Image: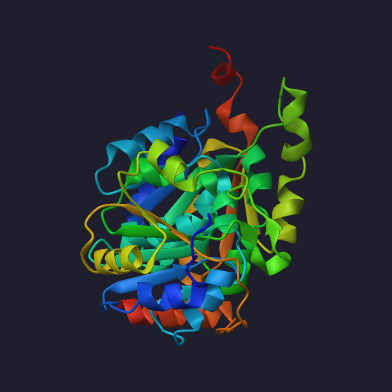
């Protein structure tokens, strides 16, 4: 599984300096890469909306930030996204999806199933990568949109990318 | 309680009386936004009209991005309570250039003076301590406020201060509410060519 390395390569290419995250199994490799890089500040959050505000602050100070979460975290962000829309801050949100492919936990379904319409209601651009070879280009395009045009972008990473094996330890 | 409380407008004026050019300010929704605006609108201030609970985290992102500038977040107890987790997040980052000052009057002033958790005993200074923020000041009179104002000119570690203010309700002073304009103006002031 090397798509997280592809995302990280795009982070480095785009000079993303702050990465906010709530720990997530699907993002674990990417989180490790960020934590290991001295030029990327990894910011462990208690809730995802903190990362929305963090990214706005980073942009006010001239830095680029990214925000990693799983689909349940999207619901935590909704009101804070008004900051992004009102001020037209760039936002790059990478969301690993739960509650869809081979989900064994029904509690993940209510939020997972409304991520896309919820984000669109918040005026965010939403793209999705279903296979490993779609990920890096989707993230590259998201970076261009977010920081080139001060847009709010979410890239949804399908549960199929993470696979079943990841959930059984 | 039982002592004379600081009036918020006098407190903000004293807090920023010795403001240096390298101090950039983020204000929390809503009374602290009007307080800072009462000193005259500054391009080095980012005024929040919304995003309740986000002021401290905006301050963190800004402080990490601008390590050579000092960043001051001025917010109220209600706004801080909504983002209480951000004190845990800031407590493990501890940027040297971030100060958070909470104007604590124990009420939600914008919505009709309903009591907040702090009035019922929740201690924001103790929360900051428990989150690992070592430099803390509890401010309840003019002398302590003066000491905090001086500290803002040269602090070199994450700072958390609680300023006990009276639950008064001075007339609102409204800054620009165009978020895009505020963002652009602030970025220009901090030296980013956009």
Q: Position of residue B112 (x, y in %)?
A: 73, 66
Which sits in the foreground, B52 or A133?
B52
Q: Position of residue B8 (x, y in %)?
A: 50, 72
Q: Is residue A137 visible?
A: no
Total tally of numbered discs in the picture: 0
Which sits in the foreground, A107 or B21?
B21
On screen, residue A87 above or below B113: below
Image quarter hosting the C terminus of chain B:
bottom left
Residue found at the very far bottom of the displayed protein: B40
Which sits in the foreground, A7 or B71?
B71
Q: Is residue B87 visible?
A: yes
On screen, residue A4 above or below B115: above
**Left or right side of A96 for B98:** left
**Left or right side of A45 for A155:** right
* Figure colour scheme: rainbow
Residue found at the very far top of the displayed protein: A169
Residue found at the very far front of the displayed protein: B2
Q: Residue at x 38, y 52 (%)?
A: A18
Q: Position of residue A7 (x, y in %)?
A: 43, 44
Q: Residue at x 42, y 31 (%)?
A: A29
Which sits in the foreground, A155 or B77?
B77
Q: Position of residue B180 (x, y in %)?
A: 54, 79
**Left or right side of B29 for B26:** left
**Image-quadrant location for residue A64:** bottom left
């Amino acid at each position: 599984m090397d798509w997280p390395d592809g995302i990280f390569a795009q982070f480095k290419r785009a000079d993303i300096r702050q990465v906010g995250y709530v720990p997530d199994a699907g993002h674990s490799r990417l989180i490790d890469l960020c934590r290991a890089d001295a030029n990327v500040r990894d910011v462990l959050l208690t809730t995802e909306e903190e990362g929305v505000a963090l990214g706005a602050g980073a942009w006010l100070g001239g830095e680029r930030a990214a925000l990693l979460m799983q689909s349940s975290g999207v619901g935590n962000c909704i009101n804070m996204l008004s900051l992004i829309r009102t001020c037209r801050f760039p936002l790059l949100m990478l969301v690993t999806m739960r509650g869809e492919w081979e989900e064994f936990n029904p509690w993940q379904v209510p939020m997972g199933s409304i991520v896309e319409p919820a984000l669109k209601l918040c005026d965010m651009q939403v793209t999705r990568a279903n296979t490993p070879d779609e990920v890096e280009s989707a993230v590259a395009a998201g970076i261009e949109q977010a920081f080139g045009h001060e847009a709010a972008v979410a890239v949804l990473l399908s549960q199929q990318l993470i696979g079943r094996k990841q959930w059984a330890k | 309680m039982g002592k004379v409380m600081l009036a918020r407008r006098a407190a903000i004026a004293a807090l920023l009386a010795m403001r240096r050019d390298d101090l950039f300010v983020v204000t929390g929704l809503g009374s602290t936004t009007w307080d800072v605006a009462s000193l005259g609108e500054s391009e080095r201030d980012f005024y929040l009209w919304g995003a309740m609970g986000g002021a401290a985290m905006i301050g963190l992102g800004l402080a990490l991005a601008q390590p050579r500038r000092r960043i001051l977040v001025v917010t109220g107890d209600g706004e801080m309570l909504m983002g209480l987790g951000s004190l845990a997040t800031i407590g493990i980052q501890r940027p040297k250039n971030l100060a958070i000052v909470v104007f604590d009057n124990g009420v939600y002033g914008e919505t009709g003076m309903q009591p907040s958790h702090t009035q019922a005993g929740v201690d924001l200074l103790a929360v900051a301590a428990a989150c690992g923020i070592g430099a803390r000041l509890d401010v309840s009179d003019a002398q302590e406020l003066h000491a905090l104002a001086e500290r803002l000119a040269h602090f070199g570690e994450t700072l958390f201060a609680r300023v006990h203010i009276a639950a008064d309700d001075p007339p609102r002073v409204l800054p620009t509410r165009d978020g895009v304009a505020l963002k652009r103006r602030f970025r220009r002031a901090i030296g980013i060519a956009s």
